[in-house]
Amino acid sequence: MGKAFILCLFLMGTAQGFSQAEITEEELYDHISFLTSADNAGRYPGSKTNKALTNYIVQELKSSGVEKPKRSYRQKFTAELRVSGKTQKKPKVKTWNIIGVLRGNHPTLRNEYIVLGAHYDHLGYGGPSSKSDKKNAVHPGADDNASGTAALLEIAERLAHNKDRLQRSVIFVAFGAEEQGLLGSKHFVANPPVPLSQIKLMINMDMVGRLNDQKHVYMGGAGTFPGGERLMAELGKKAGLNPVIHAGSVGGSDHVSFYKKGIPVLGMHTGGHPQYHTPEDTLDLINIEGEKMVCDYIYETILALAGSDRTLQFIAQD
Ligand SMILES: [Zn+2]
């Protein structure tokens, strides 16, 4: 064996051993598999395994080369949990948002931020937001929103490998307690790691694991910044997808917290299904190949917007 060949093998080995420059179906599968595992018991805020679960997210971001924004990747907050009876007292628990940053290279644009977010929490054993009559069954939330959390980790990893192409900076957030009323994102915009005026766009991924045969990727908010609808249509086509683009329709998930502060948003998902908020939202129903396509689409969107000085002026929608 020649020296060059051995070196080549060594480099291939390290690429596989640490982090990959590409988003892979295997890694997406592994993330969703961990997030939906019995140990994580439906990712309920304040549960016994909440801290270990967030450690996983921190470790993944760290090993990809994503930095902590200030002193810590963790942003702790208190969540008041939903209860079924009106008179019942709401339990208060401690939980976390996990935040990472990749700094842009342009001397001034690096002070502008694009936020990519996904909530990692789910319903635990069901509770008042469950649509199922099976009480006390783990709700694994594979699509809602292990899929978005896995996408966040994979897109962060690929962007970290290509950070020399970033002009603006990118913040990654795994939100806690979304299912309890967007609590993580509300806390984030009330206590942002950078001034809100410097956040130029927020892209949210909530349920991106069920791409259908028509390859429909749904999004709200594409009209909240100039040329958004056109850009998303073009990039979608290039990605081999059929995006269903709404200028407004800003609702349903953590991007709403940013929209209410006058920040442009894109809320991305692959559509609803009968397993929504039931114990049957499982890993085997995830379209991993489709999710990789959606991830690559969002990756290209971030590169187009963070890799340029394109105007991201807020446009309100009805
Ligand atoms: Zn949900």
Image (spheres, grey):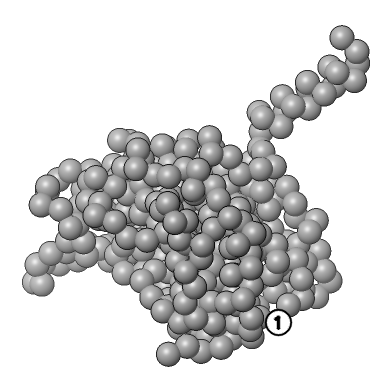
Q: Is residue 187 left or right of residue 166?
A: left
Q: Report whether residue 260 is seen.
A: yes
Q: Position of residue 293 (x, y in %)?
A: 55, 51
Looking at the image, which residue is at 86% across and 18% down?
5
Image location (x, y in percent) of residue 187: 44, 71
Q: Which residue is mark 1?
A: 311
Q: Residue furthest front?
A: 214
Looking at the image, can residue 71 be seen? no
Q: Estimate the x, y position of residue 251 in percent, counting from the top left.
A: 38, 75
Find residue 69 and report its horizontal and vertical position in percent. Answer: 63, 61
Quarter of the image where the C terminus is located: bottom left
Position of residue 128 relative to residue 287, above or below, is below
- Whether disc 1's CB lies below 8 Å from ligand 1 is answered no
Q: Is residue 312 above or below residue 304?
A: below
Total residue callouts: 1
Label 1 Cα crowd, 10 Å radius (few <14 / some 14-19 / many 20+): few
Q: In screen coordinates, is 255 left or right of 63?
A: left
Q: Residue at x 32, y 53 (%)?
A: 122
| Disc 1, SS | loop
In the picture provided, is 89 more to the left or to the right than 97?
left
| Residue 287 versus residue 117 in the image, above or below | above
The answer to whether residue 62 is above or below residue 68 is above
Residue kind at label 1, given as amino acid type: Thr
* Residue beneath the point at 54% across and 47% down: 292
The N terminus sits in image quarter? top right
Q: Residue at x 73, y 77 (%)?
A: 310
Q: Residue furthest right?
A: 3
